[in-house]
Image (spheres, grey):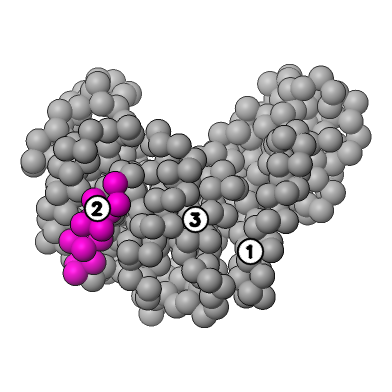
Amino acid sequence: MSGFSFEVFAKDGAARRGRLRTDHGSVETPVFMPVGTQATVKGLTVDQLASTGARMILANTYHLYLRPTHQRIQSLGGLHRFMAYDGSMLTDSGGFQVFSLSDLNRLSEEGVRFRSHLDGSEHFLSPESSMEIQAALGADVVMAFDHCVALPAEEKMVEEAVSRTTRWAKRCVGAFGPRRRHEAGHEQVLFGIMQGGVLKSQRERSARELTPLDLAGYAIGGLSVGESKEDLHRMSAFSAALLPQEKPRYLMGVGFPEDILAAVEGGVDMFDCVLPTRMARNGTLMTHEGRLALRNARFASDERPVEESCSCLACTKHTRAYLRHLIIAGEILGPVLCTLHNLSFYQTLMAEIRQAIQNRAFEEYQASFLARYQAENGRVP
């Protein structure tokens, strides 16, 4: 096992084409990581997941801590073995879930005391316990425990969150180290998380305080939490430019294609979002022409595939009419096939982005994609 590494081998403007390596394989970047919240990408086996082209996924510390518990997963050999997944994996810190349940938590300098959304039981999460949980889970990349605030927010609140995020990041390093070996033998590395809302001065301060920790990578947190699209695009590019050139840059929780393209243009390498799987369960499919809402009656007799160019099982074997029937009838197969398609779409999108950067044609690709994607105002013909 050789451990974690990252290299950038092609650039087009600020857009970067690279390769991230863990002891569970190579991941081409820019990469989109499907979200497997509770040790599963909802509805898919790991083989189906692999068929979409995904090579790295995200799992959720908060949910796995509550159920089945990190101790149980650790006793069963770690998260990779538990879910029979042999690809690369990242776990979030649990912080975002805790702070998003603001009516159930109490914040202090030591950490956050919160009540479980499952049964109301009281728990405490700190930088040290987040590191303990993630070390036990065994993901290749673990995230520092940070303080994320919803936007819009007062400047003082953003400043306090940046300061606390720095202090907590240092405590994470103290508890976990920059990297360590899991008992299963593979290396785990720690990523820091930049905060700062939409304030450039605070983003600069967060980067200035975190980069001396010399972590394996850095995430851009605190975006896609209520700000405008314009601010999201502006701040993701501004933030990426503040982070080390030689380290991977990860924009957390962003998943609309136009937002991914804008962030790639600014130099971001990694993305995750529940968007494609959540939309699939609601019968909404992504295509290069826009979104397709299967519940619309106009698809009831539509014999075309979702997307002619797509090689996923939903597109090669089934019609829009059949997929719509499954969704309307509440059949389990409907969300499964729709999830397969949406994740395949995202992996195809990322492969096209990587090739465009390699060809030094990213700007042209971005313009061409957005012209098609918005041509029908988000409605597929």
Checking the image for residue 363, the label placed there is 1
Q: CA distance from mark 3 to mark 2?
A: 20 Å
Q: CA distance from mark 3 to mark 1?
A: 12 Å
Q: Quadrant of residue 17?
A: bottom right
Secondary element at tag 2: helix
Sequence-wise, the earlier of marks 3 and 2 is 2
Sequence-wise, the earlier of marks 3 and 1 is 3
Residue 208 lies in the magenta-colored region: yes
Q: Amino acid at mark 3?
A: Ala
Residues packed near mark 1 inside 10 Å, few (<14), some (14 to 19) or many (20 plus): some
User: Which residues lie in the magenta part?
Assistant: 199-213
The residue that appears at 59% across and 41% down in the rendered structure is: 276
- Where residue 168 sits in the image (x, y, percent)? 15, 51
- Please say if 314 is above or below 240: above
Sequence-wise, the earlier of marks 2 and 1 is 2
Q: Quadrant of the N terminus?
A: bottom left
